[in-house]
Image (cartoon, helix red, strand yellow):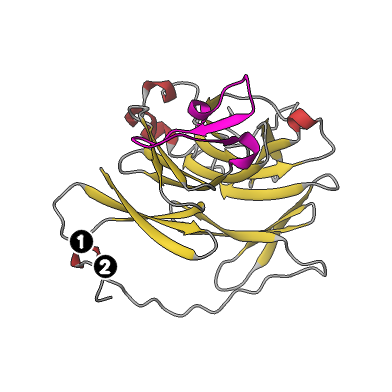
Amino acid sequence: MDNVPGILKQKCEESDFIKPIELTQFEGGFSNGKFLTHKGIDTEFFYAVEDNKFLLYETSNGASKPYHTWVFENGTLIFDAVYFPINETIKAIAVAIWDPSLDFSKSNYIALISLRNKQIVEKIHVPYHIECLRTIYDGADMPKEKFRLQQTFHENWPHILFVGCRNGLACLTHFGVENDEVDANSGVPNSKKCMLLSKLFTNDNDDTFTFKPDGGQPTTMKKSAAIVTGFHYIEKSRCLVIGYNFGGIVTVSLVTQKVQCYYMKDGAIEHFALQEPDDDPRPILYLWTSVRDNLTRFEKNQFLD
């Protein structure tokens, strides 16, 4: 800690020891899973994936019990899931899925699952394999927050969901629903409004992805070589931060729509952590980034709020 600047040192508090929660595991084991949080707070839900099954557990009072299991078509892959309330009273989860039984143009989609009726309310498709989902504003928060954003979001955006994909695709989208009434066509993924954040780097005429860092030399690669690997939303400044597998970082303001690009290090930008220094009157936020390459390294960047 001696080498850490005083301004970055934080006060830490020791947490109470919590006994690990054991989950009922099937013979085949789980391929992935995680605790679902809402605004950084534990929702007491944990999801796990076993082949084409999406299993949800309740994990209250130091114990776990199965909540529900959703079974998709054979061969289906489930990549990610986020807690995503439809409104203030209806809890829901958004799940990223690849279903090989569907037409290629609709095989990658996001399913919105109501935790009240335990049904899939809506599906929206995206063109490429989904690497990550992140909640910007869910249906409970959007009515209170939308007027602080750019005017584009004031109407016909009941919530905002970030989607990061292969081929460098990054976008904002929504399901277009405000309750959990099941769409009669929910069996087929639909096209909803989508705001492309990566359009600056691609065009429809070729298969290239050209990253253009501010004040640096452009880097060109095939679209298939570009993958969204990290994401963070800085709510205080309403700024999206997107990380790529080649070391690029893109920031997008949801207020001004200003885009800034940075090139950090060769390697995948996988995680971000926001830090507000103690007792510093300057309007500065520190954003720590983790970069994965042949050697694990940690880099630091800072943004003005």
Amino acid carrying mark 2 in the image: Gln
x then y, percent, for residue 47: 65, 58
Q: Quadrant of the N terminus?
A: bottom left
- Count of labels shown? 2
231 up-or-down from 64: above or below: above
At 22% across and 66% down in the image, what residue appears?
5
Splitting the image into 4 quarters, where does residue 194 fall? top right
Splitting the image into 4 quarters, where does residue 204 fall? top right
Q: Which residue is mark 1?
A: 278
Residue 225 highlighted magenta (yes or no): yes
Amino acid carrying mark 1 in the image: Asp
Question: Counting other residues with Cα less than 10 Å from the Cα at mark 1, is it few (<14), some (14-19), or many (20 or more)?
Answer: few
Image side of residue 217 versus residue 158, left or right: left
Q: Which residue is mark 2?
A: 10
Image side of residue 57 versus residue 144, left or right: right
Mark 2 secondary-structure assignment: loop
Mark 1 secondary-structure assignment: loop
Which one is in front, 76 or 270? 270
Image side of residue 17 versus residue 115, left or right: left
x then y, percent, for residue 167: 62, 37
Question: Counting other residues with Cα less than 10 Å from the Cα at mark 2, is it few (<14), some (14-19), or many (20 or more)?
Answer: few
Furthest residue toward left = 281
At 42% across and 21% down in the image, what residue appears?
152
Asked if the residue under mark 1 is in contact with the one under mark 2, i.e. CB atoms within 8 Å, the reply is yes
Give, as a single range, the part of the protein colored magenta. Answer: 198-226
2 up-or-down from 34: above or below: below
Residue 236 highlighted magenta (yes or no): no
x then y, percent, for residue 239: 37, 39
Which one is in front, 270 or 223? 223
Separation of marks 2 and 1 at Cα, in angstroms: 7 Å
